[in-house]
Amino acid sequence: MTIRTHILGFPRIGAARELKLALERHWRGEVSEAALEATGQQLRARHWALQRDAGLDYVTVGDFALYDQVASHIQLLGCEPARFNFTPEQSPLARYFTMARGEATQAQHADCGHAHAAGTAALEMSKWFDTNYHYLVPELSPQTQFSLAGERLLAEVAEAQALGHQVKAALIGPLTFLWLGKEKTPGFERLALLEQLLPVYGALLDRLKQQGVTWVQLDEPILGLDLPNAWRSAVESTYWQLNQVGVNILLATYFSPLEENLSLTCRLPVAGLHVDGIRAPHELISVTDWLPEHKVLSIGIVDGRNIWRTDLDAALAVLQPLAARRNGQLWLAPSCSLLHVPFSLEAETELDGEIKSWLAFATEKLSEIAVLKGALEGQSDAATLAALASSRLAIAGRRASPRVQRASVTQRLQALTPTVDRRDSSFPLRQAVQRARFQLPDFPTTTIGSFPQTAAIRAARASRQRGELASVEYEQQMRAEIAHAVARQEALGLDVLVHGEAERNDMVEYFGEQLDGFAFTRLGWVQSYGSRCVKPPVLYGDVQRPAAMTVAWTVHAQSLTHKPMKGMLTGPVTLLQWSFVRDDQPRASTALQLALAIRDEVQDLETAGIGIIQIDEPAIREGLPLRRGQWDAYLDWATRAFRIAASVVSDATQIHTHMCYAEFNNILPQIAAMDADVITLETSRSDMELLTDLGQFRYQNEIGPGVYDIHSPRVPSTLDMVRLLQKASAVIPPANLWVNPDCGLKTRGWAETEAALKNMVAAAQQMRAAA
Ligand code: GLN
Ligand code: ZN
């Protein structure tokens, strides 16, 4: 047996988010370039040491980036967009951060990072496949030129070698790099740049080889996508050309099955192939058989996308026959880069011990790989046996735990009737009942839910968390904030009010903390982009709502006004999408449980007299599978989960939903299938293109296209908004139109918020007058 172990990549941000802190201090001018680079170097050294100490055969170099791995490749390949007009005086690092963040004059939105303003805009951001990581999008045009700027990467390789490590370099493959880019010239096809790009990759591989690197991992996750034919045909010639250099290429695929690309991928002239055994376990046997024997097969056997401890016995049962088929030659790795999981469980001192025993973060996953190697090689030393035994115990404990499987939840699921996701009446009938009840003017005005999370609000929450502020006082303060938000909305003349979400830290965490089945980590940070990290909750068990979560706040808010007060909830799909979820049941089942918990809350709000309830689903689009063939199945259960949450109410209760951050054009039928009475959407950035599509599609229900971009600090004029509403009226029946901003206002200040909403209300009044 010759088993080798490695990883595809490691989280860069640091155990205590050292990189985040250093970056932010550098941007504030408090830390020099040299000091920031030194932090990077320390982190790399630490992370390589972890890999070596865990017993891995290679350390991975090239996965580190100060901001983003794709942005690093833009520099590595010498294709910084000309529009930045960089001058020779600007250091590579200064240029790097300008591409990432735009020019200093512009503001960046805290939530989504979209940059706005007059200066030079940053590179656009986009989601890295189906993860919550955002990469910087390469801008490609017929003028794009490539030239090798390998100094940084080669220096990192030298760093690792000086520390005595066996190095495997990791790079984004040329096809995936081009795929991730965006054409900046209409009609231009970015694949045309491949011919120019390959010599630069060739030169880079050659330099790595000269520096003594024997293995280079080239990531081509696009082999798991539905590739256009031109791209498929380019794969073979690309790797034929790169293989000429004579360095061992390990082609890495992940996130998705290879399907029709499987035989093509196995035939490629490369020294090795890595496949994702977690997302595509059913392909392992065919890959093992198709891949010629002299090539290395690397199996991604530990989940790089989730935080569960690996069932080592089950993994060995998968690996043993594969190893036998490969004459005992196998490489083992996590399924994909560990970028998508938190650093280490060591910091989780407050996490419930039982739940903690079920988890493995990046550092723990390194050990799992090493133990699997030992076990596969037949080692029976005490450490290997102990590791296997402890895994066995934890897996059995998790399977049997009453905190995971709750009989009450199972029973409820079994008792669901086929009509649980149906409202009593069709939309036109409901609309008539609701119109009679609420008597709203034409072009009714509302907002999306949150109002500014001021410094005072954040300070109150922090001091309550530190135990300095008693719950009663905290509650009083939040009630006062709500009263304040209600008074301001009344003064502005809005028609449907919100309580403002002052009491909520985060739209997922707030609900997760009150539901059974969720756990929270202390330092379970995962990089979202640049210095930004998120801390997803851990959804470990059957979900159940022990008590009402929002009713008291909403009822308090309603008591302060005669206008309708909208109850505000996060939808089941978004709760699922922004958490680490169970791997012991399908996502659809977890979504269904979440739907029932939200349904209970909807019911309680209605009973408490709340007539309008909004269920936010901003993340529904990002749950779409990478392969089109799986879209329908996903959209079926996702929209059903939403309807189950919403359908408990009577016809007279108005259900709203809100979506943002995505292009919805290709899922309009499914949005319609959610059957919300009103949907508020982000459209202002696409200048309402989406509306044209909605008009053509003949969307029936009421709709509030965002009339201004809340991500911009600019106060929109009444005229701007009237124009947008006129455009909207041309494609959507005016009687169905609502007037609202395009997202929540929590990241804005009160002054700009009031100024913008004042103009917005005026815009609605002008529309009414003109009707
Ligand atoms: N109701 C939420 C808010 O206003 C919606 C947030 C979102 O769309 N991401 O903040
Ligand atoms: Zn939004």
Image: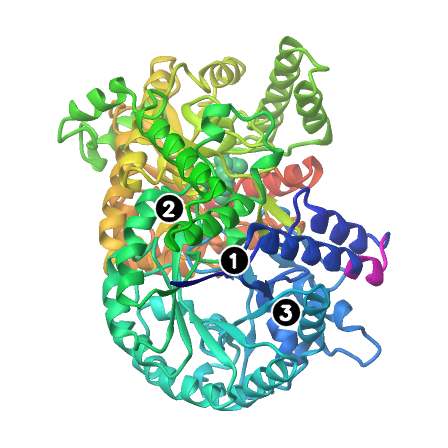
Whether residue 425 is situated above or below residue 115 in the rendered picture: above
Of residues 757 and 193, the one drawn nearer to the viewer in this rendering: 193
Residue 72: give its label: 3
304 in relation to 451, above or below: below
Q: Position of residue 560 (x, y in %)?
A: 54, 15
Q: CA distance from mark 2 to mark 3?
A: 30 Å
Residue nearest the observer in this picture, 748 or 44: 44
On residue 620, the disc is 2
Considering the whole magenta stretch, tell me its main secondary structure. Answer: helix
- Mark 3 vs mark 1, foreground winner is 3
- What residue is shown at x 70% (from left), y 68% (from top)? 96
Q: Residue under circle 1?
A: 685
Tag 3 near tag 1, CB within 8 Å: no
Label 1 element class: helix
Nearer the viewer's eye, disc 2 or disc 3?
A: 3
Residue 572 in which image quadrant: top left
Q: How many residues crowd around disc 3 within 10 Å: few (fewer than 14), some, or many (20 or more)?
A: many
Disc 3 is placed on an element classified as helix
Which region shows up in magenta?
A: 31-37
